Image (spheres, rainbow, N blue to C red):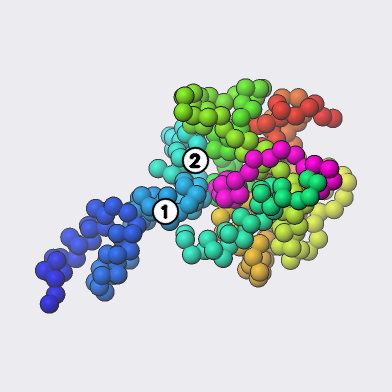
Amino acid sequence: MESPLLALPTELLALLPQHLANIEDFKELSSTCRRFRDICSLVSPKTILRLAAASSRVFFRPDPYFLVAATAEQIADWALLGEENMNRFRSALKNGMAGLSALHASRFTTFNPVIDLIDQCAGKQWYQVEDFWHGGRSDAETIHCEPECALFEIAVYGSLFRSTLKANLDHRKGLDLDTRLDFIKYCIGHWFRDNYKGFAVQQYGPYRIRWDNPHPKREQHSIRHILKSCRWNAAWEKARALCGADFEGADFDSDCRQRLWLNAVQIQGLEAFEMLTPGGADRWKGRLLELRDKIERLDLNRMQSDEKDMHGNIFALDCPILEDEIFLCSSGMWPRYS
């Protein structure tokens, strides 16, 4: 016997998903019968995201990194629509990752292998080597790294700012350096926050002073360590090799193009990690060739930045380069360099 509920007009039944508690309820509703399956297929992405967020601590871990990474590019596009949106976006950044959170099957084929790679670069596997401090690791240092969180921090940066990279390579404006530094300061926290000369943090998000709010971990330091890791870069080198040679040479021009190229491949958002899986890079070849061609034809004289770190060194290019921007934010903890 057909349920009386199904006698209701489709317009009324379509309102049901808005009143569900979480994504599990949505899944159960969609599997009830063919009519509800069809109705659930038309539910707005906003409703799906709300239901997913309600289940984030069970199905979308780490929370909130997973869902933020999945929606970051749309957030960036929205922020670029106007000054008011940009101000709200920067305000949200100051609450850390949780301020931005206001894909489960791919996790096992793409994300878990990359999380394992990060663990080998800066996590427990990296530490578990004989004589770690005495030649066991050439890059031995004190690192606190949570590989899952590190992956999504890199992914979110890419999703937020790859549209800016694309605009900058065409000599157009995107999200500016101050906005990118706000993301790094507040969403990739760092305990060494008092000596940001010119890059001071305010008491928001991870820096909010409360008795139950510990100092942020050295996440910026661990991300920079990963990006400089030989193992990490060797994995990405295989993807770049599909597009021909890197930009070689000791001159400033070649060095800048190579840094852009190394970075650009890695900040293509959450799905970019597919390049590190077997056969994944082949599916990116067309996009990578286009990206490399733009970098090769780029007029570097139009990309110069006036920003300096606390030691007075020029910040080379006004273009999203995650490693450089992390160094800029945390330069207070490094000795003066030449």
Residue 58's mark?
1
On the picture, is 335 further left or further right than 62? right
Q: Could you tell me which quadrant the C terminus lies in?
A: top right
Mark 2 near mark 1, Cβ–Cβ under 8 Å? no
Secondary structure at badge 2 equals helix
Residue, disc 2: 97
Q: Quadrant of residue 35?
A: bottom left
In this view, the residue in front, 238 or 217, is 217
Q: Earlier in the sequence, mark 2 or mark 1?
A: 1
Q: Which residues are magenta?
A: 133-156
Give how far across and how far down residue 278 sits, in percent. 66, 69
* 79 vs 335: above or below: below
| Residue type, label 2 | Met
In this view, the residue in front, 3 or 179, is 3
In this view, the residue in front, 321 or 336, is 336
Is 149 magenta? The answer is: yes
Residue at 45% over, 40% down: 98
